[in-house]
């Protein structure tokens, strides 16, 4: 199978590193030197900065890791070339543009997926596989925090897309939390939020958010997101009628991860405990699922339509409004 990666930045490079394990990989970037560098490092085929030439390669799948504002434009060209697509999150910046694209992709019978690799994280998998043990889930609390200046080593945080309100901010970047809770409990039905910049970081985007969500299943979830914690931390607690599941992850490379189950009958039990978690494994598993999806196999990837609903929810949340329905 041939996969084309559009965008050879840090994320595109990571996709290339993983994809060569399962497929023949091509790469293209507006910076031809960067495309050539990544291609040489990971034994890929470089198309320099020529997207038209790259799409004529007749690849089965295209992975789009350009800046958010370019996602739909590039994805449209990709599906017109006959490829299925895997788009970096968020799927886009404009809901009407995304809706139009998804309708077009459906007409062309092309598959559209979005990178939400947390669905493949060992902790999320452990929670998903053991949710039935806590009875009827009642509510959930999730959180993610990381210090923005430390997110990309050797890159000025002011230049990151997440520092720009038009493309990023902590809510759009923290879309993973909304996604996995929606995967567990159904799409977002209502959302309320407090979103703002509360730090002295030199950005014009939000760095703090508190979200309140009602899911389609009626479960309520609370999500805290920030770019302020000096150590990367994420996790959640889900409480049910018969017990609870608690997850906490700390750090990056290595990531320390623990998932525990509590029931009144047996007390606490570890479902997962790993002090040296391979943070790249979820990315690899996601790519394998994408290849399977191209071949018509069942998968757990986030679909384009799921991504559209999440984009609507996050854009409403950024307004900091009272509860609103997602339609």
Image (cartoon, grey):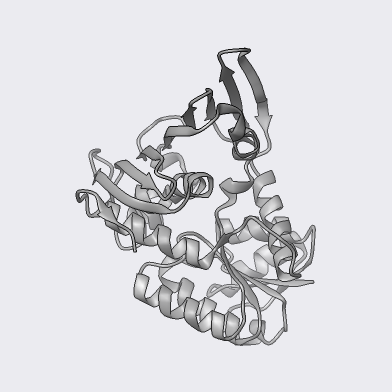
Q: Is residue 81 visible to the viewer in this orientation of the structure?
A: yes
Residue name at image x 60 percent, y 33 percent? 132
Q: How many marks?
A: 0
**Left or right of 105, for residue 292:** right
Q: Is residue 255 above or below residue 157?
A: above
Quadrant of the rendering where the N terminus is positioned: bottom right
Q: Is residue 204 visible to the viewer in this orientation of the structure?
A: no
Q: Position of residue 201 (x, y in %)?
A: 28, 42
Q: Position of residue 147 (x, y in %)?
A: 40, 37
Q: Is residue 231 above or below residue 177?
A: above
Q: Position of residue 317 (x, y in %)?
A: 29, 52
Q: Nearer the viewer, residue 54 or 105?
A: 105
Quadrant of the rendering where the C terminus is positioned: bottom left
Q: Is residue 103 above or below residue 139?
A: below
Residue name at image x 63 percent, y 33 percent? 130
**Left or right of 28, for residue 24:** right
Q: Position of residue 265 (x, y in %)?
A: 61, 12
- Res 149 → quadrant: top left
Q: Is residue 240 above or below residue 76?
A: above
Residue name at image x 31 percent, y 41 percent? 212
Q: Nearer the viewer, residue 44 or 174?
A: 174
Residue name at image x 41 percent, y 30 percent? 230
Q: Nearer the viewer, residue 87 or 103?
A: 103
């Amino acid at each position: 199978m041939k996969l084309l990666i559009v965008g050879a930045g840090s994320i595109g490079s990571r996709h290339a590193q993983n994809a060569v394990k399962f497929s023949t990989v091509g790469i293209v970037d507006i910076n031809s030197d960067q495309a050539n560098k990544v291609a040489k490092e990971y034994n890929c085929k470089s198309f320099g900065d020529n997207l038209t030439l790259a799409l004529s390669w007749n690849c089965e799948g295209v992975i789009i890791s350009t800046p958010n504002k370019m996602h739909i434009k590039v994805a449209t060209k990709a599906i017109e070339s006959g490829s299925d697509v895997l788009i970096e999150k968020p799927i886009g910046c404009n809901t009407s543009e995304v809706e139009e694209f998804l309708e077009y992709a459906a007409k062309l019978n092309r598959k559209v997926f979005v990178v939400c690799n947390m669905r493949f994280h060992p902790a999320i998998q452990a929670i998903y596989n053991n949710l039935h043990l806590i009875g009827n889930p009642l509510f959930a609390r999730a959180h993610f925090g990381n210090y923005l200046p430390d997110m990309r080593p050797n890159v000025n945080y002011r230049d990151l897309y997440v520092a720009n309100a038009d493309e990023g901010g902590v809510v759009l970047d923290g879309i993973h939390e909304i996604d996995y809770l929606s995967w567990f409990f159904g799409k977002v039905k209502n959302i309320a939020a407090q979103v703002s910049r509360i730090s002295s970081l030199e950005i014009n985007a939000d760095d703090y958010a508190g979200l309140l969500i009602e899911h389609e299943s009626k479960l309520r979830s609370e999500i805290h997101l920030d770019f302020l914690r000096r150590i990367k931390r994420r996790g959640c607690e889900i409480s049910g009628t018969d017990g609870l599941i608690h997850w906490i992850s700390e750090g990056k490379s290595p990531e320390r991860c623990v998932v525990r189950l509590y029931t009144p009958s047996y007390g606490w039990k570890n479902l997962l405990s790993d002090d040296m978690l391979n943070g790249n494994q979820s990315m690899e598993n996601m790519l394998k699922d994408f290849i399977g999806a191209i071949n018509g196999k069942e998968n757990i990837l986030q679909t384009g339509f799921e991504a559209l609903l999440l984009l609507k929810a996050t854009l409403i949340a950024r307004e900091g409004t009272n509860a609103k329905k997602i339609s």
